[in-house]
Structures are given as C-alpha cells and as structure tokens.
Amino acid sequence: MKTDSVVGSGGSQISANTYEEVAERFRAYLATQSLRMTRQREELLTAVFHAPRHFEAEDLIKTLRERQGHVSRATVYRTLSLLEECGVLRKSLFGHNRHFYESVVGRHHHDHLVCIRCGKIQEFEEPRIEEMQEQICTRYGFKILDHVHEIFGACENCQNEPTEARKH
Amino acid sequence: MKTDSVVGSGGSQISANTYEEVAERFRAYLATQSLRMTRQREELLTAVFHAPRHFEAEDLIKTLRERQGHVSRATVYRTLSLLEECGVLRKSLFGHNRHFYESVVGRHHHDHLVCIRCGKIQEFEEPRIEEMQEQICTRYGFKILDHVHEIFGACENCQNEPTEARKH
DNA sequence: ATGGTATTGAGACTCGTTCTTAAAGGAACC
DNA sequence: GGTTCCTTTAAGAACGAGTCTCAATACCAT
C-alpha cells in the first residue's frame, strides 16, 4: 500500500491520486479475488472519487439514483465493502451510530474530531498516539487489524449555541 | 463526578461502589431532571449492577424477561440512556456496529481491545493518549464531550486460527 | 459464440433502536 | 383520601441502515 504522497488539510476532494491510479488499484484487487470490473463498480468508483471528503453510503445511493446509470442499494453496499477491503476507502464513525466513508489512497492516516451539533469533521494526525496503540497491542499480544478513534464534542462555532432542554 | 476509587482489572462485576451509592447518584440525577424513580428503573439498575462487566442492551432485556418483574424493551433503552447521561454507564463499540455498555462508577477511564474472532474484550489504560487527545482538542478549539477509541483485531488465542475464505 | 462464473436488482428481511398511544402511576395540593 | 396534572409505561408499529435471496443478466477466457 502506498500512502506516501500527502494532501493538505481542509480540501474537499478525496485525494491527490488520479482516478486512474485508484481505478487501477481497485481493478488489481478485484483480479486477486477473481472478481470482475462491471459497469456498476466503475460508476461507483467515479462517484466516490467525486464525493466530498466525508460521505455516507446513502449520499452515494442518492447521487447514483439521480443519474441515468442506476445502481442498486445492495450493490452500493457490496462495492463500498470491496473498496474498503482494498484500501481505497476507510469507514469511520459519525456520531455513535452513523458511519461515513473517506478515501485514503495517497493520504496519511488520521482520525477525527466530530462536532455533534453541526456535523463538522476536523481531521487530526498524531503519530505518537498510533505508536502507543502499537505498544499496547504488543503488551497484550494482540494483532491490530483496525481501530476507531473518534472524538465527539462541540466545535469552536457550536460551543456558544445554547443547549436544548430535555423533551419529555 | 467521583471516579477516584479503583478496581483491579479482570473482575467480572461492575464496580467497587455499592449498589446504594450508584442508586443514589441515579436518583439525584433523576431529581435534577424532574424525573421519577419507578419500579422499572429500579429493577433495571439492579440488573445492570449484576450484569457482567460488558453487556449489550439485549442481554439486559433477556435477563429482565426471565424474572417476574417484566420491563419493556422501550423502557430498557430509555433507562440505559439515562444511566449513560448521569455517568453510571458508558457505551462502547463491539465491532463496527454493535454496542456494549459497561459501568464506569468508581472505575478509571479505559479503552478496549476487541477481538473480532472470539469477542473477547481487553481493557487498557493509557493516560498519555488521553492527554494527547486533550492537547489536540485545545489546538482546534474543540470541546470534547466523549470519545471512542476501540482497537479491533485478533487476541493472542485467535491469531493462530485459520482465516475463512471469501464466499461468493 | 459458448459456457461457467460472478454480478445484479428488487424487494423481503433483519436487527437494533425509537416512536406512538392509550392506560396506569407518582407527586403535590387540597 | 381525593383531585389534578403531569410523567411513565407496555406493546407493538415503525424506522433506518444494512444484508440476503434468487432469478435474470453480464463478464470474459476459450
């Protein structure tokens, strides 16, 4: 996996890599699994490439529905999983229940500060935390496959807004 | 919130605090919200107190169903949220979708290594990570309310098991 | 072009969770 | 104790995200 090229923080497109590079990686992965490149998978890849930095599965479904080339819900979910498996996408938490995806090709690993009021997502990078994670896993003989590290709270703008009262 | 008494790692009961202390905290919270202590809420609290360290909402529903004092599903979820709000319970991730709860009264903050094969949960404490989190939030003017830091992977025992092949 | 897979769409289904509604239960006041 | 005014409850319907089923269709190596 190459993750050495870097992207400035704050952009809204997914990656510094070209569509062709990403498509190539996907195609290669499909080949290793004896899976095929189809019209739907290609269309999805394009949609993902043009999606905002952080998007939810339903967004993608909606986007694809609006175009002529319809792709079914099941296929969207199936393909998102494939893209996750081959390291093109990463799935994160948007609040305690919802998920969002983001493209990771050509980007450094990072985690998120999620504002629970306005939904804003701020990325952060902290290699020292990653390193400590590794140490912890070593300590317990645990083989790390994946992790979720999301911080929920209020972004600068939302801290001043009044809080809602409990509704009975 | 007092969280200064400590509990050894590995026990299966939830906390060093007595039931009365926890009940008192809950009652106090209810009072501040003009909510009432009811038979159901009391029964749930007892069930939570006797639940294993990490449990899911459905476990609790099942447990309560087996006793005479039945509590409805909706009430269980409502009460779990209340217990979370008042700092008695914490909700964490058990795999990318499922949730589990654990009691936090009288316990140090910790996070989890979750084995995705056998489901074993290993707790870990790393104050330096927490501290860095704080720093990051300060850097972005973010007010942290909550965080999720779960590491998924294979525990020592499960690392040797063969992996399953893709099913088409 | 053929054949053997892989893939797809549509909708049924699951699962965890929340909502709705009428009925029952507290609490405060008389 | 009775009245009044909430709050709470149970049961099941509803919800939303995601998965499964399966017959029809698309790939692609030959």
Image (tube, coloured by chain):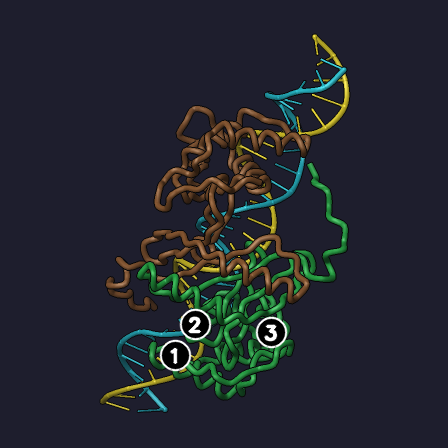
Chain colours: A brown, B green, C yellow, D cyan
Chain letter behind tag 2: B
Q: Nearer the viewer, residue A112 or A9?
A: A9
Earlier in the chain: of badge 2 and badge 3, it is 3
**Amino acid under disc 3:** Arg
Image position of C10 with respect to B49: above or below? above
Chain letter behind tag 3: B
**Please, what secondary structure does the residue beneath circle 1 have?**
helix
Residue B8 screen position, x and y as percent: 61, 81
**Please, what secondary structure does the residue beneath circle 3 have?**
loop
Residue under pointer 3:
B53
Image quadrant for the C terminus of chain A?
A: bottom left
Residue under pointer 1:
B30
**Amino acid under disc 1:** Leu
Image position of A76 with respect to B90: above or below? above
Q: Nearer the viewer, mark 1 or mark 3?
A: 3
Image quadrant for the N terminus of chain A?
A: top right
Residue under pointer 2:
B82
Residue B132 falls in image quadrant: bottom left
Residue C7 screen position, x and y as percent: 61, 29
Earlier in the chain: of badge 2 and badge 1, it is 1
